[in-house]
Amino acid sequence: MNLNFTLREMTHLRYFAPIVIESAKQGIKSTFYIGQSNKYNCPLLPVNSRDLLVFAKQNGVELKSMADLKTAKDVIITNEKSCMEQISELSGVTKVATTYQTDFVYNYKTFNYEDVYDYIAMPSRNIAKFYEIESDKNIYVGISKYDVSIQKNEVVKKYGLSEDRNIVIFIWPKARDMHKMPIDIISNFNELGWQVVVKTRGKDPINRNTVDYLTSNGNVVLSDSSWYPHTTQELLESADLVVNSGSTMIEECIMHNTPLINFDIKPKNRHGRVHKHRVTHSYLYEYDFCLNLKGLDASFTTDKLDSMVKSLLEKDMKKSFESCKRDWLYTHDNSSRKLIQHLKEVV
C-alpha cells in the first residue's frame, strides 16, 4: 500500500507527519504532492520549503508536484477540502479526508464530503453526532497530530523560556476581536512574576511597537516557528496555563492537559455569515479545567488575578481532562496507527 498526501498548506503537516512516521515503521511508502496556496503557510515559500525538505529527507518522503497527482496509487489523504477538486477527478484510488480543528462543521455538508471521499477521519462519534454529520463514511480514529512526543526541557531551551517562572500562553486575538480582549492582563501576569508567551499566527500579526513592548518586559512573542512538531503544541508542553478567547485551541489544551482561562468574546457573525454554532467545540469549555469569563471590569486587579489563578490551578484536573477526552475526543494512544490499520483492511 502506498500513501499519498496533498499538501498546499504547511499547517496540514502536523496532521500528516505522524501518519508518515507510523507508516514508515510498517514499511509503507509516503509521497507528498505539493501545490501552491499563496498564503503565509504555502509549502513553496523558501522558508517553508526548507523545513519540508528536511522532514522529507528524514522520513523517506518523496516530493512531487500537484500536477502529478493523477499518478498516485492506492490511497490519497488530504486535509478537509484542500485539493478537493483535483481529487474528485481521480478514479481507482481510495480517497481519505482528515479533519482540521472544526473546519468540518461548515465544510462537511457545504462541500459534500460524502460525494468525494471514501472515508472521513473524525475525532469521535459524539462530535459527529453533535454537529449532525454522522455517516457510514466516517471513521472515528481520533486526531493524528497528537501522536507526537515533546520534551519540555527541549522546548524551554529552543524558545528561550524561563526555567524558574510560571509560564502562561496568551493567544493573540484576531483583529476583529481586539477591542473586546483584555490585553492588559499580560501586565497583571508580569506583576505576579509569570512569563507570558504571546502566540500569534502569520495571518494575525502583531505590530512591531507592541512586540517591542512585550519583549521589554521579559515576555516572548512567537508565531509559527515550527510546523512539526507544531509551535503551539510545543509550548503547551511547557506552559502552566493558557489565556484563550474561544478559539479551537481548547482542543489542543485538553489533549496536552493544560488548563485555561477563556474570554468568551467570539461574535456570532463571522466571515460575512451568521454561524449556527457561535463557539465551535463549546462543549469542551464546560469542564473545571477551564475558567470562563466575559471580560474584566474596572475593579480587576493583579491580586484578583492571583486569587483566580490559584483557585483554578489548585484543583486536581486529571479526572476532568480524562472525562472530557472520553466524552468528546478520544482516549487511545495512536490515531495514526488506527487510521493505517483501517486502510490496510479496506484497500
Image: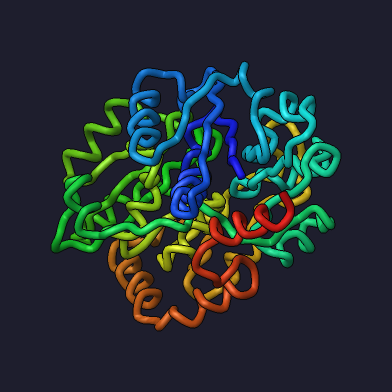
Q: Is residue 77 above or below residue 244?
A: above
Q: Position of residue 12 (x, y in %)?
A: 52, 38
Q: Position of residue 235 (x, y in %)?
A: 33, 53
Q: Is residue 115 above or below residue 166?
A: above
Residue located at (52% from left, 22% from top): 64
Residue located at (23% from left, 36% from top): 213
Q: Position of residue 201 (x, y in %)?
A: 43, 35
Q: Position of residue 340 (x, y in %)?
A: 60, 54
Residue located at (47% from left, 30% from top): 62
Q: Is residue 69 above or below residue 201?
A: above
Q: Is residue 314 toward the left or the right of residue 118 in the image? A: left
Residue located at (84% from left, 57% from top): 136
- The quadrant where residue 3 appears: top right
Viewer-proximal residue among 154 and 137: 137
Residue located farthest toward the left when viewing the structure as drawn: 164
Q: Is residue 188 toward the left or the right of residue 7 in the image? A: left
Quadrant containing the N terminus is top right
Viewer-proximal residue among 240 and 143: 143
Viewer-proximal residue among 281 and 147: 147
Viewer-proximal residue among 57 and 153: 57
- The quadrant where residue 149 appears: bottom left
